[in-house]
Image (cartoon, grey):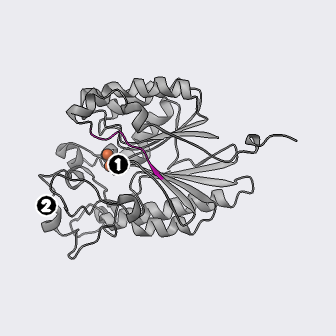
Amino acid sequence: MKLAYISDLHVDISQRNWELVPQIAEVLRIIHPDVFLICGDVSPELGDMEYALDCFSSLECHKLFVPGNQDIWVMSERMQEEGHDSYEKYYFYIPEVCRRNGFTPIWMEPVIIQKVGFAGSIGWYDFTLNHRDGDPETEDIRKSFEDEIWNDLKWACWSDISYLTESEPGPYRRSDREVSREFINRLDQDIKSLSGNQEVREIVVGLHHPPYSQLVGHLDHPQGDLYFPFLGSEEMGKMLMRHPKVNTVICGHIHEKRDIMLGGKRMLCSPVGYLSYQRRKDMSIVEDSLSVIYLFDEDDWLKT
Ligand SMILES: [Fe+2]
Ligand SMILES: [Fe+2]
């Protein structure tokens, strides 16, 4: 099985990011993979996501998607006050965009293709990767990111409707740790179901947030050794290690390419990221940011 994957298209970031999408589709037409997986961060605007996925809709392969943190942003305080939230995008609007454009939303519907199971999740974070003293969920630490690069604080909005039924007011948002745990449990269930299926020989997991510190490595940042707490979850990594059929994990979010082995599993990341002015002129961006791997297939063996 030929599996092509990419992440972090960020089509809203620059004209070059936007124009890159049809070029990626053209290359995919030549590569002709069996499966194409996008691991999140296309755009917070659903219209942009519609554009991006539509560019790939005529490709004759299985097309799979998991959302990234920027995809679930609700970028209007008024809409948030009216009750619109990230769950609504994650479980309803984004799956709709996927289905309209021939993509399977694998965090909602795991699939089996040629005896390979595919499951996925946004992942989220619980501050266990790149841990440093202090509680990252306190306002002080989180606020320091507000003017920096971290907009999840404002626009990621996981509502807790249980408070609406109680007499005490708020908080109406679930904590990042709770959200992370919920998505780990959900993915664990999906992987268990796939693992229990005799037909499934191996499982590929698509995530947005990386589940291992080894994947994060040393991230280049203009401020040097900046504390960067919004990376993923160790618990997610431990859960994946408990499933022997999971042999490939593909993630996004870190904007750096990765291909490493951990505990017998292959960990991959192949992002576009925020294209700098210099990078935008570079004609090899598609080549650099679109990756292909081959998974075991009975048909790969020569018949005797
Ligand atoms: Fe990203
Ligand atoms: Fe991200």
The dot on residue 256 is 1
Name the quarter where the N terminus is drawn. Answer: top right
Q: Principal SS element in the magenta part?
A: loop
Name the quarter where the C terminus is drawn. Answer: top right
Instruction: Using the numbered discs, state the Cα–Cα distance from disc 1 to disc 2 in whole angstroms.
Output: 25 Å
**SS of the residue at dot 2?**
helix
Q: Identify whether 13 is placed above or below 138.
A: above
Indicate whether residue 269 is drawn in magenta.
yes
Q: Residues within 10 Å of mark 2 (few under 14, many from 20)?
A: some
On screen, residue 286 versus residue 298, left or right, reads left
**Residue at image location 14% in from the left, 52% down from the top:** 148
The dot on residue 143 is 2
Which one is earlier in the sequence, the residue at label 1 or at label 2?
2
**Residue at image location 52% in from the left, 46% down from the top:** 106
* Residue 52 on image: x %, y %: 39, 29
Residue type at tag 2? Lys
Q: Residues within 10 Å of mark 1 (few under 14, many from 20)?
A: some
* Residue 53 on image: x %, y %: 43, 30
Mark 1 or 2, closer to the camera: 1
On screen, residue 246 versus residue 180, left or right, reads right
* Image quadrant where residue 203 sits: bottom right
Indicate whether residue 211 is drawn in magenta.
no
Q: Is mark 1 within 8 Å of ligand 1?
A: no
**Residue at image location 29% in from the left, 68% down from the top:** 166
Magenta stretch: give its range: 268-274
**SS of the residue at dot 1?**
loop
State the residue lying farthest toward the bottom. 133
Query: Of residues 265 and 65, which is closer to you in this image?
Result: 265
Residue type at tag 1? Glu
Q: Identify whether 180 is placed above or below 281.
A: below
